[in-house]
Image: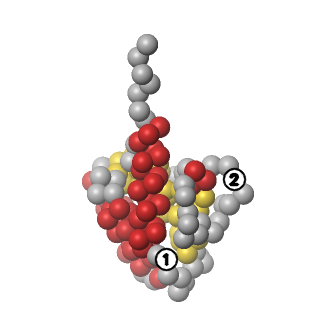
């Protein structure tokens, strides 16, 4: 699906739902499950469509959801700053900013640990948006 960068809004949710349905295999099921977990972790999350992929944001980008032939990749914009005791991050580990979770067919992800990562990302984004004190 090559949709234009449409930002956020109700049509974006439809684009993401359409992407999940079009995949029609384990990748669609996986992306759909991760989307549900994101919404459970942060009911106020905003869905966007950027760079041809779903993007979830709250006071900044939380993560993107890319699909490839052999993986669903969830890239956290500020993942290097998140605590990951469950070791969900398994890709893009060498950078100073981003971290990713690559899910392959048959992989199971700890839903509670994933939701904790989402909540941490929201807290980190929200902390970065605080207004500086007035002098």
On the image, the x and y values in percent for residue 117 come to 47, 60
- Of 98 and 9, which appears nearest the observer? 98
Q: Quadrant of the C terminus?
A: top left
Q: Residue at x 60, y 58 (%)?
A: 99
Q: In the rendering, which numbered label is found on residue 95?
A: 2
- Report which quarter residue 104 is drawn in: bottom right
Q: Residue at x 42, y 50 (%)?
A: 122
The percent coordinates of residue 118 (x first, y second) are: 43, 59
Q: CA distance from mark 1 to mark 2?
A: 22 Å
Q: Position of residue 28 (x, y in %)?
A: 43, 76
Relative to 24, 12 lies left or right? left
Considering the numbered disc 2 on the image, is that residue within a helix, a strand or a loop? loop
Residue in front for this viewpoint, 75 or 4? 75
Q: Nearer the viewer, residue 32 or 37?
A: 37
How many neighbours does mark 2 have within 10 angstroms: few (below 14), some (14-19), or many (20 or more)? few
Residue 33: % across, % down: 39, 74
The residue that mark 1 highlights is 109
- Residue sitting at the far bottom: 106
Left or right of 48: which side holds 106? right
Q: Mark 1 and 2 residues: CB-CB less than 8 Å, in contact? A: no
In the image, is residue 36 above or below residue 122? below
Residue situated furthest right in the rendering: 94
Picture residue at 68% right of the left edge, 60% below the top: 93
């Amino acid at each position: 699906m090559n949709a234009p960068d449409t930002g956020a809004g109700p049509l974006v949710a439809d684009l993401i739902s359409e992407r999940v349905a079009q995949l029609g295999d384990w990748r669609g099921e996986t992306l759909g499950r991760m989307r549900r977990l994101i919404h459970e972790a942060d009911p106020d999350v905003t869905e966007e469509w950027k760079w041809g992929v779903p993007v979830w944001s709250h006071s900044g980008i939380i993560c993107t959801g890319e699909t490839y032939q052999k993986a669903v990749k969830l890239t956290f914009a500020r993942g290097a700053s998140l605590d990951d005791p469950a070791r969900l991050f398994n890709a893009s580990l060498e950078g100073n900013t981003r971290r990713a979770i690559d899910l392959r067919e048959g992989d199971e992800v700890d839903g509670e640990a994933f939701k904790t990562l989402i909540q941490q990302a929201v807290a980190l984004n929200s902390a970065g948006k605080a207004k500086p004190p007035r002098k």
